[in-house]
Image (tube, helix red, strand yellow):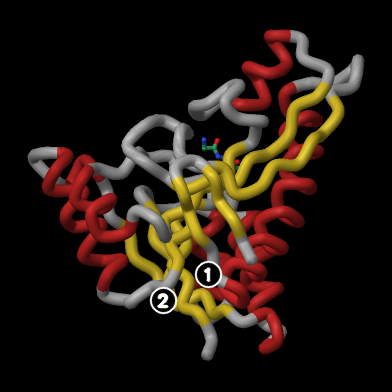
């Protein structure tokens, strides 16, 4: 049976695009059944529409309280009965309602080697710190900021003449490969989480 993926985005959607390409092969074992965003007018929504994937937008500012946004987002996602929910550049922290529904099957790709450089400026923070190696981390989402159990990590060198842009792009290339590989393995083989240890058999 093909696993159902809901992908959440806030931006250009290059990770989404990589997943859509992978899903075109039936042997991959997954289908993107919906793409959700926290804002309009982003390239990732156009990528989804061009692929014929249903989209929804759920904006924090349309709700009087953040908890109501969290409930609405949960309802949007739940409607598509996902096996796995993927934050691929989704820049909002979900709340307790969302986690009650999807914790343990909500994953995020982050553009640094956690626990270093969490938050929304992973490449910039890595450059500013002067590390020589950074990378990307795929992890389950919990109530913290990029603190959940780690599924996979890939290292990426920082070069002497890197700018935030060049480093971000080098990380993204490795990040996309990792995301596609591990989402595929997870949907085909399953996974377990014991404490902080994630195992894909
Ligand atoms: C990705 O590099 C992802 O790691 C990052 O946003 C980018 C989205 O790119 N996420 C974060 O910074 C969240 N902490 P994309 O829209 O091209 O897939």
Percent across and percent down for residue 135 are 73, 34
- In the image shown, does 160 or 99 lie closer to the viewer? 99
Total numbered badges shown on the rendered structure: 2
Above or below 74: residue 32: below
Position of 106 with respect to 151 (left or right) is left
Position of 7 with respect to 125 (left or right) is left
In which image quadrant can residue 104 be found?
Answer: bottom left
Position of 23 with respect to 103 (left or right) is right
| Rendered residue at 75%/27% (across/down) | 134
Percent across and percent down for residue 13 are 58, 55
Above or below 35: residue 100: above
Kindly check if marks 1 and 2 are in contact, taking CB atoms under 8 A apart as contact: yes
The residue indicated by pointer 1 is 48
Q: Quadrant of the C terminus?
A: bottom right
Percent across and percent down for residue 39 are 37, 49
Residue located farthest toward the front when viewing the structure as drawn: 194
Q: Earlier in the sequence, mark 1 or mark 2?
A: 1
Circle 1 SS class: helix
| Rendered residue at 61%/26% (across/down) | 122
Q: Residues within 10 Å of mark 1 (few under 14, many from 20)?
A: many
Above or below 13: residue 82: below
Percent across and percent down for residue 96 are 21, 44
- In the image shown, does 115 or 74 lie closer to the viewer? 115
In which image quadrant can residue 150 be found?
Answer: top right
> Which quarter of the rendered image does ligand 1 occupy?
top right
- Which numbered disc covers residue 54? 2
């Amino acid at each position: 049976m093909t696993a159902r993926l809901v992908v959440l985005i806030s931006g250009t959607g290059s990770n989404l695009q990589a997943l859509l390409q992978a899903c075109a092969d039936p042997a991959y074992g997954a289908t993107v059944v919906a793409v959700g965003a926290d804002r309009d007018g982003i390239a990732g929504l156009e990528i989804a529409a061009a692929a014929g994937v249903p989209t929804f937008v759920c904006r924090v500012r349309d709700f009087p309280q953040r908890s109501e946004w969290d409930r609405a987002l949960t309802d949007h996602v739940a409607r598509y009965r996902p096996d796995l929910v993927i934050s691929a550049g989704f820049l909002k922290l979900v709340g307790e309602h969302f986690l009650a529904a999807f914790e343990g099957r909500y994953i995020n790709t982050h553009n640094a080697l956690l626990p270093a450089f969490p938050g929304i400026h992973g490449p910039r923070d890595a450059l500013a710190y002067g590390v020589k190696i950074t990378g990307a981390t795929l992890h389950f989402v919990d109530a913290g900021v990029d603190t959940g159990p780690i599924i996979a990590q890939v290292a990426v060198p920082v070069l002497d003449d890197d700018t935030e842009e060049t480093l971000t792009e080098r990380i993204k290339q490795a990040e996309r490969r990792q995301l596609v590989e591990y989402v595929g393995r997870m949907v085909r083989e399953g996974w377990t989480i014991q404490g902080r240890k994630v195992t894909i058999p």
